[in-house]
Image (cartoon, rainbow, N blue to C red):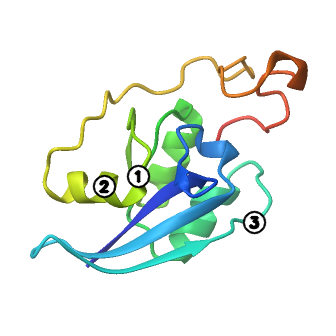
Amino acid sequence: MITIAVPLMGGSFSDHFGGADAFALYSVDEARRTVNGRQVLVPPEHGHGVYPMWLRQLGATVVLAGGMGPRATGMFAQHGIQVVLGVQGNDPDALVRSYLDETLVASGEPCHDHSFHDCGHHAPREGGCGNHHHDD
């Protein structure tokens, strides 16, 4: 049994991990490739290392993510959570289904410039990603 965590924004997949307003957690029977349960939870306030610890406490073993910095990816690895990077799509259920079917298209590219950058997910007047802490 594995648990797959998918970041959400407004109920759809959020390709900006640190900007997620919720996470869908899927309990999966990996051998049978079936989803046994799904719950949506609001994360604690975002801060350095908070999401990896929180998701691990919830039993997450895999995270589907769009972009994420290398330090954040390393923190997930330290908690025993595999990160699948470069995921694209809107429907979190479909993304998990694709992951289980081994048809998920993911570039595997981390988010390189985490200084914080204008990642294109925020309007310039909002200061790019400057509202978030380092390392999603």
First-in-chain label (3 vs 1): 3
Disc 1 versus disc 2: distance between alpha carbons?
A: 5 Å
* Residue lying farthest to the left in this orientation: 32
Instruction: Give the number of the disc on residue 94.
Output: 2
Q: Position of residue 33 (x, y in %)?
A: 14, 70
- Amino acid tagged 1: Asp
- Amino acid tagged 2: Ala
Front residue of this view, candidates 135 and 5: 5
Nearer the observer: mark 2 or 3; the answer is 2
Helix, strand or loop at disc 1?
A: loop
First-in-chain label (2 vs 3): 3
Q: Position of residue 95 (x, y in %)?
A: 32, 51
Residue under the image location 80 percent in, 59 percent down: 45
Residue under the image location 39 percent in, 40 percent down: 89
The residue where tag 1 is placed is 91
Helix, strand or loop at disc 3?
A: loop
Helix, strand or loop at disc 2?
A: helix
Q: Position of residue 58 (x, y in %)?
A: 53, 77
Q: Position of residue 65 (x, y in %)?
A: 46, 43
Q: Residues within 10 Å of mark 1 (few under 14, many from 20)?
A: some
Horizontal arrangement in the rendering, residue 20 relative to residue 66 (left or right): right
Disc 3 versus disc 1: distance between alpha carbons?
A: 23 Å
The residue where tag 3 is placed is 44
Q: Quadrant of the N terminus?
A: bottom left
Residue under the image location 50 percent in, 42 percent down: 74
Residue under the image location 25 percent in, 35 percent down: 105
Horizontal arrangement in the rendering, residue 7 relative to residue 81 (left or right): right
Q: Is residue 99 above or below residue 34?
A: above
Horizontal arrangement in the rendering, residue 57 relative to residue 127 (left or right): left
Q: Quadrant of the C terminus?
A: top right
